[in-house]
Image (cartoon, rainbow, N blue to C red):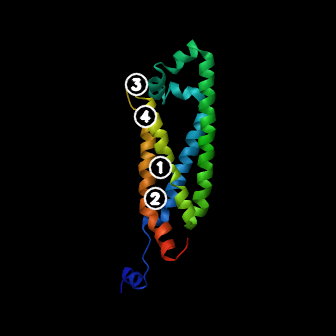
Amino acid sequence: MSREGELAAQGTRRETWFERNAWTVFTAISLVAVVFGLGDIFMGGSTFATGEGVLFNRLTGTTWDALQGADAGAANLIDYQVRASGAYISLFGFLSLAICVTALRRGERWAWYAMWVWPLGVALIVAVLWSATQGPGNGIPVPIISGSITIVVSVVTLALSARRYVRRRILAGDR
């Protein structure tokens, strides 16, 4: 009898790659969040002079350099907000990372449910950003692209790993 046949006869089966490795996918997402957050902490508002120029232009109708020259106080406030947001993004990434390498890796159901914060939270951020950037301007802001990718990767990973975290526990009567 084949290995698959033996597992079927025992009422068990081999876990899929996603069931075994969902924690690694979310570990990677968490690490990316930490890196992006640290980048915002260290770069501050100057991030709008480079990669986030499209976002800044769509939100303000001007460039980062022009704002700094026209209203240094407003530029300082934006710089602070970017750095503070970076701290929150990094903190969220570190907390998610802790859940990934412990409870999610062990297959604990609550940790799988906690990972739903990624697609739901990022979808909320993308929706708010999308509605705020509907004015004139060229290009799609980078956070909308990266956020959409994060949503797809996390939902696919959660869906394809659900059997490990939900079904087995339900069948065992674990509530």
Q: Which residue is mark 2?
A: 158
Q: Amino acid at mark 1?
A: Pro
Q: Choose mark 4 or mark 2, whichever is in front.
A: 4
Q: Which residue type carries mark 4?
A: Trp
Evaluate if marks 1 and 2 touch, with contact meaning CB atoms under 8 Å apart. yes
Image quadrant assignment for residue 105? bottom right
Mark 3–mark 2 Cα distance, whole angstroms, equals: 34 Å
Query: Where is residue 144 drawn, in percent x and y?
Result: 43, 37
Judge by depth and name the residue closer to the eye, 158 or 65. Answer: 158
Mark 4 crowd level (few <14, some 14–19, many ≥20, 10 Å Cα): some
Tell me how far mark 4 sits from mark 3, CA to CA: 10 Å
Q: In terms of secondary structure, where does tag 3 sit?
A: loop
In the image, is residue 8 above or below residue 117?
A: below
Residue neighbourhood size for the residue with mark 1, other residues' Cα within 10 Å, grouped as few (<14), some (14–19), many (≥20)? many
Q: Earlier in the sequence, mark 1 or mark 3?
A: 1
Tell me where residue 159 sits by quadrant: bottom left
Task: Say what amino acid the circle numbered 3 marks.
Answer: Gly
Residue at image location 61% in from the left, 30% down from the top: 81
Earlier in the chain: of badge 1 and badge 2, it is 1
Q: Return the disc, 4 or 2, that comes first in the chain's sequence.
A: 4
Q: Which mark is residue 163?
A: none
**What's the residue type where badge 2 is placed?**
Leu
Name the residue carrying label 4: 130
- Is the C-beta separation of discs 3 and 2 under 8 Å? no
Residue 65 drawn at (x, y percent): 53, 18
The disc at residue 135 is 3
Q: Residue at x 40, y 24 (%)?
A: 135
Examine the rendering and report whether any part of residue 83 can be seen: yes
Q: Secondary structure at mark 2?
A: helix
Question: Of helix, strand and loop, which one carries label 1?
Answer: helix
Circle 1 sits on which residue?
Answer: 119
